[in-house]
Image: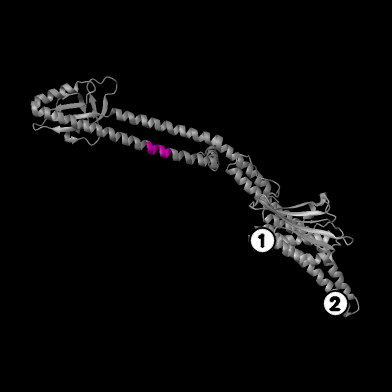
């Protein structure tokens, strides 16, 4: 019964694990491609060189046979044999052989031939082996090509060229090919060790970061080395995506918490009023008043949900934002005209500081919504019954950007709370006595992001300035992804 060798399976397992590595597979593929190209190139060069050398040899043989034919015509067989004998003794001579009709050697420098070479006239189709006289260098047998001519008296004349140099050339080429393949194998191993291992380390870092992200740590980011290569570009894009996902998750969690907290109060009021209306004696006027109050509460909750839905759609990009050239000055003028009656009722003066025309590429609906929210917030939180407040809507165009600002000279917002007021449902009036849902600035911030801009809160000295800055050339995804 055969005995199994467990270590062989271990070696196969390690080999399979090694071949699963991308760097190893790439190195192996490159090595095979280089090897195939090298082999094809060497075979082509060798075959071409051999063909050229063989053609030159056969032309030389034909020329020598033509010379011997002239000697034969002029001097006969005796002159031909003497010429062959003389030429065969010269240094570096070609192959010469003259035999009688019985095949016995008469003249030449060939001691023996491969069997059957002299049987057929004309050029030998393939190289044949022969033994030359006075070979004392240990190499008795050589290869040659030749052409055989038969004379009328039955004699055979052979003229050929040695092909040993060609054989040695092929050997040198084969040795060079083997050496080149060995060097390429070593180079592939070096490339895998230095380049592949470096890439594998970076992939391991990405894998580790991805595992932490999958475990729930959305603050984790993929490593960026600063090399600017494909790995860094991929990591940058994925980090931007992660920042976007983290922002949406935080927003979702914040919205869920705020909905549970802020909508509990109006729902409680609705229930209380409904119970009070049911418990009170039947009275048409009181019942109508209770119903109107409940309808107002429902309308406020609907507006809150509409605002939340718009913020979510704008931030998530689920609705395609259609941008086109619009006149921002005309939109600002329309919003100011719309809110002027409300400003007079609130003892405020609404002013417009804008050029006659300011054409920008943006969404008309979203920009109008943002400006309306800013003016509405100013009317709600900046007005003072004891004095007249000025609210100024300003449009300006700078280097590469345009700005839309709403300023007031009211109480303003403390510096430490300016970031908080951009959060959903956050309100400075913790008692919730002021109207509103705390979503106005959150919606304006979402609109700023979808246009590649930002929302800035600053001092108006006194009062507050809320400014929407948008670059003319939109930074695709930069603001939206960073949050």
Q: Is residue 94 above or below residue 291?
A: above
What residue is shown at x 34% (from left), y 31% (from top)? Answer: 170
What residue is shown at x 48% (from left), y 40% (from top)? Answer: 30
Q: Secondary structure at mark 2?
A: helix
What residue is shown at x 63% (from left), y 44% (from top)? Answer: 206
Which residue does the numbered mark 1 point to in the structure image? 327
Q: Quadrant of residue 36?
A: top left
Q: Is residue 387 above or below residue 295?
A: above
- Residue 226 visible at all: yes
Q: Quadrant of residue 447?
A: bottom right
Give the numbered dot on residue 288. 2
Q: Nearer the viewer, residue 139 or 302?
A: 302
Could you tell whether 37 is left or right of 227 in the image?
left
Q: Which residues are magenta?
A: 35-41
Mark 2 and mark 1: Cα distance apart in space: 46 Å
Q: Position of residue 336 (x, y in %)?
A: 75, 63
Q: Secondary structure at mark 1?
A: strand
Could you tell whether 43 is left or right of 457 in the image?
left
Q: Nearer the viewer, residue 207 or 3?
A: 207
Q: Quadrant of residue 427?
A: bottom right
Q: Earlier in the sequence, mark 2 or mark 1?
A: 2
Disc 1 crowd rating (10 Å Cα; few below 14, some 14-19, many 20+) is some
- Residue 259 visible at all: no
Could you tell whether 411 is left or right of 365 in the image?
right
Q: How many marks?
A: 2
């Amino acid at each position: 019964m055969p005995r199994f060798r467990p270590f062989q399976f271990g070696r196969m397992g390690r080999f399979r694990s090694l071949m699963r590595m991308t760097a190893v597979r790439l190195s192996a593929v490159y090595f095979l491609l280089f090897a195939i190209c090298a082999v094809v190139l060497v075979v082509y060069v060798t075959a071409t060189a051999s063909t050229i050398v063989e053609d030159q040899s056969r032309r030389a043989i034909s020329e020598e046979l033509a010379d011997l034919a002239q000697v034969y015509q002029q001097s006969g067989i005796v002159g031909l044999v003497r010429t062959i004998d003389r030429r065969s003794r010269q240094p570096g001579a070609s192959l010469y052989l003259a035999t009688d009709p019985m095949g016995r050697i008469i003249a030449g420098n060939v001691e023996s031939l491969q069997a059957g070479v002299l049987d057929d006239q004309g050029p030998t189709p393939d190289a044949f082996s022969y033994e030359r006289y006075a070979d004392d260098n240990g190499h008795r047998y050589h290869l040659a090509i030749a052409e055989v001519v038969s004379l009328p008296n039955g004699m055979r004349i052979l003229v050929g060229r040695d092909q040993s140099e060609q054989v040695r050339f092929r050997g040198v080429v084969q040795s060079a090919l083997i050496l080149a393949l060995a060097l390429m194998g070593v180079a592939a191993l070096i490339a895998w060790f230095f380049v592949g291992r470096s890439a594998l380390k970076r992939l391991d870092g990405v894998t580790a970061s991805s595992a932490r992200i999958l475990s729930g740590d959305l603050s984790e980011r993929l490593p960026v080395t600063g090399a600017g290569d494909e790995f860094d570009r991929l990591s940058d894009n994925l980090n931007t995506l992660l920042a976007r996902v983290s922002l949406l998750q935080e927003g979702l969690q914040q919205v869920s918490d705020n909905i549970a907290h802020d909508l509990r109060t109006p729902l409680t009021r609705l229930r209380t009023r409904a119970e009070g209306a049911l418990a009170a004696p039947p009275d048409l006027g009181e019942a109508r008043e209770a119903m109107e109050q409940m309808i107002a509460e429902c309308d406020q909750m609907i507006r809150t949900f509409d605002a939340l839905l718009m913020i979510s759609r704008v931030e998530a990009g689920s609705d395609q934002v259609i941008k086109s050239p619009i006149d921002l000055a005309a939109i600002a003028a329309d919003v100011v005209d719309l809110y002027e009656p409300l400003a007079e009722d609130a003892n405020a003066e609404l002013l417009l500081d804008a050029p006659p025309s300011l054409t920008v590429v943006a969404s008309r609906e979203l920009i109008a919504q943002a400006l309306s929210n800013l003016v509405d917030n100013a009317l709600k939180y900046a007005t003072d019954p004891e004095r007249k407040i000025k609210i100024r809507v300003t449009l300006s165009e700078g280097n590469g950007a345009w700005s839309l600002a709403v300023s007031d000279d009211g109480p303003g917002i403390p510096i430490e709370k300016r970031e908080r007021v951009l959060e959903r449902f956050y309100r400075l009036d913790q008692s919730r006595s002021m109207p509103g849902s705390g979503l106005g600035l959150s919606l304006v911030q979402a609109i700023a992001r979808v246009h590649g801009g930002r929302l800035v809160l600053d001092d108006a000295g006194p009062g507050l300035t809320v400014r929407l800055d948008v670059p003319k050339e939109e930074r695709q995804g930069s603001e939206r992804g960073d949050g």
